[in-house]
Image (cartoon, rainbow, N blue to C red):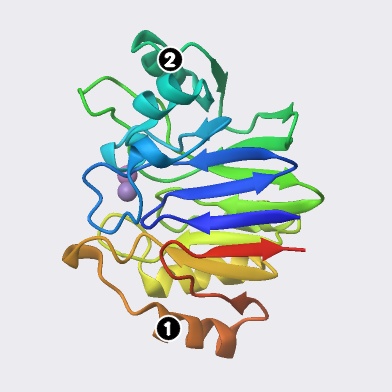
Amino acid sequence: MVALTWYGHATWQVETVGVKILIDPFFTGNPVAPVNAGEVEADFIVVTHGHGDHVGDTVAIARRTGATVIANAEIARWVGAKGVASVHAQHIGGGFHYPFGYLKLTIAVHGSSLPDGTYGGMPAGVLLTVEGKKIYHAGDTGLFASMQLIGDEGIDIAILPIGDNYTMGPEDALRAVKLLRPRRVIPMHFETWELIAQDPHAWAARVRAETDSEPRVMEIGETLSLL
Ligand code: NI
Ligand code: MN
């Protein structure tokens, strides 16, 4: 069984076969985070891009837990230089078989500079195959046509930003659902600040009406079990 927990914004935990994978662990300074960075456990931490609301508490959590940080080569090098002992660098289009499953970095249309201004390489999305389920976390991105190619892999759950301003808004995220054709889709990156505030239920109603995908609006702190 795969358990998916939302910590608000783009922060997720995927738990599978006793392994905890954190994606974009942004707790400190995140106004909606339900827990503190010091409370979470992780065996792996995946960072989609260098922005502060995605790198977040990666260094502190990895140093405390010994988690392996998975990111593009530039971000992996940066966290390694900050004292993270275990890093695994990948890059866009490349995947790797970890003990928990296969993780591939996909393209995202966005920026990726690190909090101190260091070049953070290209931003990424994450396509994770665990226990036969494909989970796509889009990271921060605008709409792009090759979401069609990602969708060709057969996505069980897509997690998409809908907040507008920095990423796709509701309209483009709806178009993304049509390209990705996931079995289920969950919105994120919309509830953190006024600037990106959206009504996820209104968006979900449009997904239900206009696509074959099943929308699921999660509560912050909620865990969804994928059987
Ligand atoms: Ni960003
Ligand atoms: Mn962001």
Helix, strand or loop at label 1? It is helix
Q: Residue furthest front?
A: 39
Q: Amino acid at mark 1?
A: His
Q: Quadrant of the N terminus?
A: bottom right
Q: Position of residue 177 (x, y in %)?
A: 57, 69
Task: Please report whichever mark, 1 or 2, sits nearer to the chain's N-terminal start.
Answer: 2
In the image, residue 78 above or below residue 137: above
Choose top left, top right, bottom left or bottom right for residue 155.
bottom right
In the image, residue 119 above or below residue 160: above
For marks 1 and 2, give the CA distance. 39 Å
Helix, strand or loop at label 2? It is loop
Q: Residues within 10 Å of mark 1 (few under 14, many from 20)?
A: some
Q: Would residue 205 appear left or right of 94 to someone viewing this image?
A: left
Q: Position of residue 76 (x, y in %)?
A: 46, 19
Choose top left, top right, bottom left or bottom right for residue 80.
top left
Q: Would residue 45 appear left or right of 117 to someone viewing this image?
A: right
Between 203 and 23, the one lying in front of the other is 23
Marker disc for residue 90: none
Label 2, ligand 1: CB separation under 8 Å: no
What residue did someone put label 2 on? 84
What residue did someone put label 1 on? 201
In the image, residue 187 above or below residue 63: below
Pointer 1 with pointer 2, Cβ within 8 A: no
Q: Would residue 195 appear left or right of 147 to someone viewing this image?
A: left
Q: Residue at x 53, y 56 (%)?
A: 5
